[in-house]
Amino acid sequence: MAGERPARVVLVTGTGTGVGKTWVAAELLRAARTVGWSVAARKPTQSSEPGTPTDADVLAAASGEDPDVVCPPHRSYERAMAPFMAADVLGRPRLRLSELIDEVTWPSSVRLGVVEGVGGVRSPITHDGADTVDLAEALAPDLVVLVADAGLGTLHAVRTCLPPIERYRVAVVLNRYDPLDDLHPRNAGWLTQWLDVPICTGAADVLPLLA
């Protein structure tokens, strides 16, 4: 990493692909800006279908930055697959975690820096086999936010994903939480009772943990 480290660095990961990591990260950035915090977002690498908004587009809209600052253009791949696979398909250079980390730069005087990982906690990102656990080790975040769906399967998914990141301070965000759906409050209640981590039902609930 280069530049002045933010006062708080949050790594956002998920129990899998499609659980809403980007949406939760963007909502956290918006909530922080609402209370006057300076923020920055980083997506070390990303892949998406051509012609669709990228994760960097969504994060940049929330943080007020340029998408090319959030994710360097040469680390953005126009194929919806793991970045290292997309790089191979597109004939692009191999990805190495050390290079991705070196490219994470921060402006000065940022109170909250949000880094979004790729896929789930153990989804490979680079050709050297690095995943979000390795990304966390390199970033040393102040908080890891684990995003999970609020509905069926979340108990297993959360319990499975926590052990690899339990060395860090962790908060779970149950995305798409609906208090009127009988299962969602039951899942939140069970996780709160049995796990020694904060269980949040919205991205804004994470903000007090960073004060």
Image (cartoon, rainbow, N blue to C red):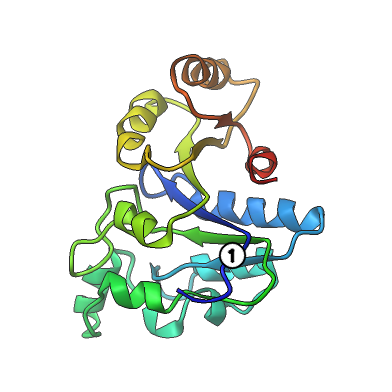
Q: Is residue 166 left or right of residue 20?
A: left
Q: Closer to the camera, 115 or 14? A: 115
Residue 188 x, y percent position in the rendering: 53, 21
Q: Is residue 69 left or right of residue 101?
A: right
Residue 28 x, y percent position in the rendering: 65, 51
Residue 60: quadrant of the picture: bottom right
Residue position for label 1: 59
Q: Is residue 60 left or right of residue 133?
A: right
Whether residue 78 is visible to the viewer of this picture, yes or no, is no
Which quadrant: the N terminus? bottom left
Image vertical order of residue 38 relative to residue 73, above or below:
above
Image vertical order of residue 147 relative to residue 6, above or below:
above
Residue 52 x, y percent position in the rendering: 49, 70
* Residue type highlighted by circle 1: Leu
Residue at 72% x, 54% y is: 32
Residue at 39% x, 71% y is: 45
Q: Closer to the camera, 55 or 64? A: 64
Image vertical order of residue 103 relative to residue 30, above or below:
below
Residue at 56% x, 68% y is: 5
Residue at 39% x, 84% y is: 74
- Packing grade of label 1 (10 A; few <14, some 14-19, many >=20) is many
